[in-house]
Image: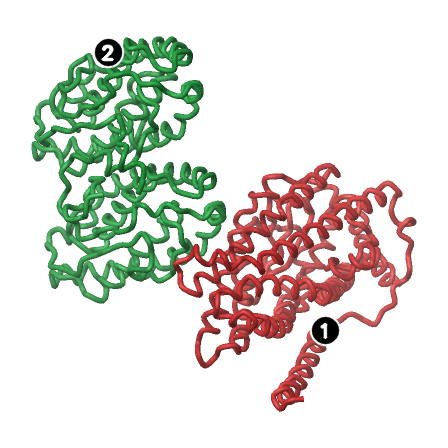
Chain colours: A red, B green
Amino acid sequence: MTRQRVAGVALLAPFAAAWAVAAWLLWRSSLPAYHLPRLSETALFPPRVLAEAQHFSSVERLLWLGGTLTQLAVLGVYSRFGIRWMRESAAGPVGTGMLLGMIGFALVWVAELPFAVLDAWCQRHNGLSASYAEATVGNWLALGSAFVALCVALGIAMNLARVRWIGDHWWLPAAPLFVGIRTLLAFVAPWLLGGRAFNAPYVAKLEAIEHVHVPVRVISGLGEPNAFATGLGASRRVFLWQPIVEPPFTPRLDSFVLAHELGHLAHNHIWKSIGWYALIIVPLAFLLSRVARRRGGMGAPEAIPLVILTYVVLWLAAQPLQAVVSRHMEAEADWSALRATRDPAAGRALFERFAAVVKEDPSPPTWDYVFLEDHPTLLQRIEMTQYWKG
Amino acid sequence: MSVHEHQPHPVKLVIEDDYRRNRLTVFFRLILVIPHVIWFFLFTVWIILMSIPNWVISLFTGKPPRWFHDLMCAYVRYQAHLNAYFSLVGNPYPGFAGEEGEYPIDIELPAEPSKQPRWTIFFRIFLAIPALIVSGVGLTAGGGQAYGRSRRRSFSTGSGSLAAVCGFLGWFASLALGRMPKGLRDAGAWSIGYTAQTSAYLLLVTDRYPNADPTEMLAGVERPPRHPVRVVGDPYDLRRSRLTVFFRLLLTLPHVVWLLLWTIPAFFAAIAQWFVTLFRGTPAASLHRFLTRFVRYRLHVYAYLFLVANPFPGFGGAEGTYPLDLEVAAPERQNRWKTFFRIFLVIPAFVVDAALGASLYAAAFLTWFYALARGAAPWGLRNLSAYALRYDAQVQSYALLLTDRYPHASPLEGEDEPAE
């Protein structure tokens, strides 16, 4: 073992320890140590609802798999041949890197379009609201934002890597910068979302119980029944999607949804998400810097196609970790909602309705659960209501 | 070398106008043109009726009969004379028969009907659509919109913005000066020439596709004096990467965001420059450099977005880094009156700029399809777009006090540019 390698391991050990301590601190929650009762999904859901949800979810899983494999294949080919588009740039190394990054993203977008269209078809076929325009070009604002975000990220990383005394250590200043941007976006985003005020009589009561006093807003124009909490400090908000405040969702079910979202804010889940993002982005940026060295370092545009591929692979690899963290927070929010509403029947009815309305598989296969499920399964959530009831 | 250099277009614009305008006829131009409008309407109906047998016979024989050819030529010429008179590009009252050589803005057409590929005759109306789009959006005389509601007539009298704007602004200028400004005259003349080429193509006078290149259209016209703000670049740089063309809108997004951010300090810099120029009589060199970079960067981004150039531009607006580049003269002494009233003085230029912007959009739209198919930009549309961008850069430079020389609307570059 060379001296350099020994020094590397010596540095890595305290870093790994610090990472583990930080992860442990972020993992701590108000959830009690619980054992969920085992319930049978066939006993909870009507056979037709169950069959439809399982069928729809299996098709969705196949589409995800197809889209992801296509994405990896496209980026694999692009990492090999992408540098040929360097000649289409007059923008210097950093600008050229941005161009290569964007072309890679654009190719992935086009390659995934058939899956997006199939997904829309599948949703419509199953009675869910989905539009082909939305699936392809309708969401242009999000697509454009992704391109700009990519350019900002590449601009930061490449410019830092091109500073002589930083070089391959660009990830050290870049990672905190990415976390800072993520924090800024989390702070600003709620003000950009708009929506109309939601003034149901139970809002104030739930806010008092959760010790969270934030505006609650309804966003229209969305097809799925859903809700989310977002924002930091003064920008904290709860957003309800229009379909969740409409039948078949009753005010009783909505109060459970709202309590769940307020639970996220009460337990600082937005801050914790940022913390987890920091824990993931630091090693990820480090690994990217190692990979980029094979093609001249992050400051060289030639490295970008390979960096993009590596980033996607690493992000996929980190998906189980992100999913388990997310499920843990969602479980805490569910628990918080049960404590606030003291209405497990409402929670159970809500989750049963989700299976029927959004065709969510109450008990997906293990690989799906590990990789994709960022919420506890519907069955687990119903089991939690049962557990709370005693 | 391009084929365009060897084979001049058979439909040529001939200009013998001396810029002088009679104030009385200018003032009453809208009234004086009424008999022509009525006659043009009748003439157009007749042409629509005759174009059907012309098309059928041409399809069988491979070329239009002589009588039909002469009739269509007369119509194309008459349309050009009328458009010229209406948009103040020409001064004298035109004749009613489209006589050749009788009007200072004239169209030279093939004397004899020529053999044409039958498939292009068969599909002519579809093939003409791109030219009609350019012609209709930006180049034809605005007076056309008053001529009636015939479906077929739209090819010759679309509500084009550029010629309309030139006529509108030229009306005030001609009344005040007794002369039509050269820039507006040239821009209007070019639009008339392109409309004539489009009509000639549609009516089977020629099978040569209309050429939007303004330099070639106005080849015989004297060049304007050199402007301190110039766009330089290789007009033969036509190669385009199909992939980046396909994704051009997405790829330009970061530049659009950056340009928006840059606009904020540029705005405040322009205000500061206004005060400096007003009091000192000369712009501050540092602000001049900053604003020049801003205008140049804007040009680079627009050139990329509108497919006038191929490579992805840099973010700094540095000189000499892009195939379509901006040259701005060093800061010079500026007239204080012009500086004080700059915000009002620039309004007419903004109007022309907006009209040219419509052409730019149409050209980019068509270039996108062409470049995807051929991997190259069309010569004519590329140069039309470059003209629009040059004028836009001059307007921006004037508004941001980089120069007090008014933007020149002529499609031709300044005098000491090497002839192409």
From the image, which quarter does the N terminus of chain A lie in?
bottom right
> Which amino acid type corresponds to the residue marked 1 in the rendered image?
Trp
Image-based side of B83 in relation to A144, left or right:
left
How many marks are shown on the rendered structure? 2
From the image, which quarter does the C terminus of chain A lie in?
bottom right
| Spatial separation of the CA atoms under disc 1 and disc 2 | 85 Å
Residue B104's image quarter? top left
> Which amino acid type corresponds to the residue marked 2 in the rendered image?
Trp
Image-based side of A272 in relation to B297, left or right:
right
- Residue ID at (21%, 46%): B346
Residue B174's image quarter? top left
- Residue B249 visible? The answer is no
Residue A364 x/y as whole percent: 82, 54
- Residue A282 visible? The answer is yes
Residue B233 x/y as whole percent: 28, 51
- Residue ID at (59%, 52%): A108
Of helix, strand and loop, which one carries label 2? helix
Dot 1 corresponds to which residue?
A27
Viewer-proximal residue among A57 and B74:
B74
Dot 2 corresponds to which residue?
B39
Viewer-proximal residue among B153 and B2:
B2
